[in-house]
Image (cartoon, rainbow, N blue to C red):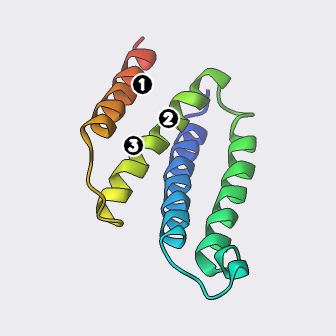
Amino acid sequence: MNKMYMLLMFVCTFFSAISQVLLKQSANRTYKHPVLEYLNWRVLVAYSIFFTVLLINTYAYTQVEMKYGPVIDAFTYVFVLLLSVGILKEKVSRGKMIGNIIIVLGIIIYTLP
């Protein structure tokens, strides 16, 4: 198992969260024409990030054991919560906090030797 590729996958989950925040920012805006809802810089950048992350993760899976992929991908939910609070100024509900705690606990339990 190559730890560099695991780190690369972890960084990719962070970029996936950034792209989701960009899509949320785009969805919160109003546009003069319906086509502009899909053809604006936030949406185009977000989908470019998604595509790039897909390619990188596909290659990284050749170097990382398959069982670690979903564990690393689960961090996306944590990153989305942190970025939505920091960038979008959303409030964290009790349910979101409990859900993220369960995700982190699951990751910790799964990765214990």
Evaluate if marks 1 and 2 touch, with contact meaning CB atoms under 8 Å apart. yes
Residue occupied by mark 3: 78
Evaluate if marks 3 and 2 touch, with contact meaning CB atoms under 8 Å apart. yes
Would residue 47 be found to the left or right of residue 18 on screen?
right
**Which is in the foreground here, disc 1 or disc 3?**
3
User: Callout 3: 10 Å neighbours few (<14), some, many (20+)?
Assistant: many
Foreground residue among 77 and 67: 77
Question: Which SS class for mark 2?
Answer: loop
User: Callout 2: 10 Å neighbours few (<14), some, many (20+)?
Assistant: some
Residue 75 x %, y %: 45, 39
- Residue at the (71%, 49%) spot, across then down: 54
- Could you tell me which quadrant the C terminus lies in? top left
Name the amino acid, label 1: Ile
Residue occupied by mark 2: 74
Question: Which SS class for mark 3?
Answer: helix
Name the amino acid, label 2: Ala
Name the amino acid, label 3: Val
Q: Which mark is residue 107?
A: 1
Would residue 107 be found to the left or right of residue 63 on screen?
left
Q: Is 39 above or below relative to 84? A: below
